[in-house]
Structure formats: structure tokens, C-alpha cells
Amino acid sequence: RQRQMCIRDRDTLGTPEVRTLANGFELYFPGSSESACIRCLMSAEGHWQGQANIELHPSLFSPEVEANEVGNTRVLEKDGRVSALAVDRDGSQTRFCLCVDADDTDGATTRAQSGLPDDIDLRWERELSLREPFWSGLTGLDVHAEVLRTALETLVYHLEPTPDGGLRSATALPKLPTSTANAIHPLVQAWLTIDPTVAARLLEHTIAGIRDDGILPANDAPDAEGTDEMAWPALAQACRLYQEAVPDSDLVTRSLPALGHHLLATAGRVDPDHRGLPAWSSPDECFIPDAFDEHVASPALATMLLREILAFQDLSATHPEEDPHAAELESIRDRLLANLSTSLWDEDNGICLDRYIDGD
């Protein structure tokens, strides 16, 4: 169901300047006598909080159904879904809270009335400050600011965790949140520059997804139930990024046993004969599905697994008691290193190449 914002008295207010964020917007009318402005932020799915100055009066209406008044709240109900807008005018400021797609009138009204904000201006400035490192890094670049701002906010939306703390896929529809553990490393790296607490939530959610057998499923989505697709080995590397940025946190230390179990299970799956020649076990897991061959050792996979082991060893170096698999992981590391410089190495071309595990 589409929703639109209609601006009354536009001839008086003039043309607005608009700034949109992934989780909010600002309308500013520079031509109005009082510099009318409205700011709105989404605090949760279907829950919007905002503030406007004296010349703007938020209201909820529909051409299809009549709104009901419940105290300071207007309520619309259609097709079993309820939307409620609570408004509180105090002097020159108007606070409001919009709750959309609630299940019942009482619940929508209560949520809207209890959600009237006191700190929208502060929260808006915080949102802008979180993006400042990105913009400050573009000094001197010839870019189209509006196009880049739209691209940035689209990216921020897809980086935002899902309501249950998971990872939103870059291809996920807004109403169909999905998670992909393969994105954990770039997501943590991105959020560490914006908000480390979000990076921590993403790591905790991903680590909690490790199965009892140690395998981390690549996908955590409504349509991925029962999937056996394994995530790429990158979780320990993501944890190391976080540990370097937030050294006082105990998140990584308390997660070492789970990470070690996961790393051994991953190595055992891609290299069940323990030869140091890992091969993808499924076309859905490898980088190029059309090139999948279970009998071919992949130097890309060997390198990723090696980097994962090295990252885990860095993390566990100061907590050896949390690493009961140290000797086994060291053996796996040494086999990978040896094969990357011998069996998988092509001297003539100076690069590593895919090799058949039992032949040339």
C-alpha cells in the first residue's frame, strides 16, 4: 500500500529542500517566514518519530477511509491493518509519532502516543555525524554529490541489521529480510567506521548461527531453511578487525571456542583427507559456480582458509586456554602453506592455479 506526503499551503511555504537518509528525511522551506522545517526518523520497522516547527502541522488522512480521533491521535484502519499518528503541539514545536501497519487499534494508538520524541534534533545530528567520515574522505574528488548521497544512503540501508540482528543482503527486498554470512567481513569493516556497536551485533548474530557440527550456513533467510551451503571462511578475520578497533571488548575472547570449532569443521569439510588441498564441496559455495569441480583444489579457497587460521591464531595468542585445537590448526596451516608454494604453484606463470587433487 502506497503512502504519500501532501504539503498544504505550498504557495505560502515555497519549494522545500529535501534531505533523505536511509532511516529518515528532512524537509526545509527556506522561503517561509519562519524557515519551516520538519525532521523524521524511523526508530523501528513501521515506527516513525518526528518534529516540526510552528508552520507545519502533521496530519494523517486517507481518501479511502475516514480517520478516527483518539485523544491526540488520528487512527486509520483498512484491510485489517492500522496506522496511528500521535501529535503534541508545545509552543513553536510539534512532536509526532507515526505507527504504521499495526495489528490492532489499541496497540497502534499506545505505540504512537508513547513514542512522542524529545530528541529528534540531537538524533538527526548524530545520524549526520556518523556519515561524516565518508564525506570527509572525499575531499577534492569531482563527484555528483546528490547521486553519491543517494548511493550512500542505499548502501547504509542494506548494511543496517535486520530486526533480529542479522545481516541484510544487498539484494534483499525491504519486506523480506535475509542474511548472508558471506558478507560479514565487509559489513563489519564498514560499520566499524560508522557505529562499532552495530558491528558487534552483526558478529554476535553470525557466531550464534554456527551449528552444533561447527558449520556456519551461508544463508539465514525465510526461503533458505534446511540449506547446507557453507559460509566462506572469513568470520575470524572479521573478528580480528573488530578486536583491533575495540580492544577493550570481550566479545571475541568469549567467542574463541565457537570460532575454533567452526574453523576445524570448515577445514574438515573442504579438505576431508587432510592433505592441504581444499576443494569446494558445492557449486553454491564456490566463487564461480559454473566452474565447480569437487576434484579440483582451489588456491583461492586455500588462501582464504589460511588467512582465517592466521587470524584465529592472532586472536587466541593471548588466551591459549581458549584454543584447545592449537596443534591441529597449526598442522592445517603448515599443509596449506606448503601446497601454496609447491602443488598449487605454477612456476612458469608465477601464480597459483587450480589443480586436480589426484593428478595434474
Image (cartoon, rainbow, N blue to C red):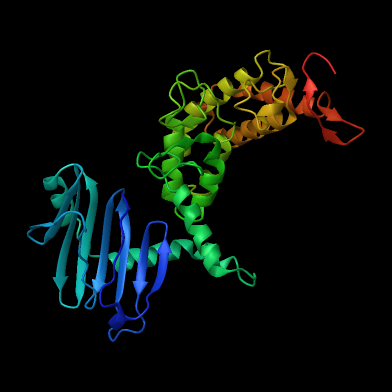
| Res. 81 visible in picture | yes
The one of 40 and 2 positioned closer to us in this rendering: 2
Q: Is residue 40 left or right of residue 345?
A: left
Q: Position of residue 126 (x, y in %)?
A: 38, 64
The one of 190 and 255 positioned closer to us in this rendering: 190
Q: Residue at the location (84% across, 29% down)? A: 345
Can you tell which quarter of the image residue 346 is in?
Answer: top right
Q: Is residue 54 left or right of residue 294?
A: left
Q: Position of residue 238 (x, y in %)?
A: 55, 40
Total of numbered circles in the picture?
Answer: 0
Of all residues shown, which one is farthest toward the front?
64
Instruction: Give the answer, above or below, for where 210 lies relative to 125.
Output: above
Q: Residue at the location (43% across, 24% down)? A: 225
Q: Is residue 98 left or right of residue 340?
A: left
The one of 357 and 99 positioned closer to us in this rendering: 99
Of all residues shown, which one is farthest toward the right?
348
Instruction: Give the answer, above or below, for where 103 lies relative to 219.
Output: below
The one of 84 and 168 positioned closer to us in this rendering: 84
Q: Is residue 251 left or right of residue 218?
A: left
Q: Position of residue 212 (x, y in %)?
A: 45, 19
The C terminus: image quadrant: top right
| Res. 248 visible in picture | no
Instruction: Give the answer, above or below, for where 11 lies relative to 293.
Output: below
Instruction: Give the answer, above or below, for where 68 lies relative to 268.
Output: below
Q: Position of residue 19 (x, y in %)?
A: 42, 68
Q: Residue at the location (15% across, 46% down)? A: 107
Can you tell which quarter of the image residue 85 is in?
Answer: bottom left
Of all residues shown, which one is farthest toward the left?
71
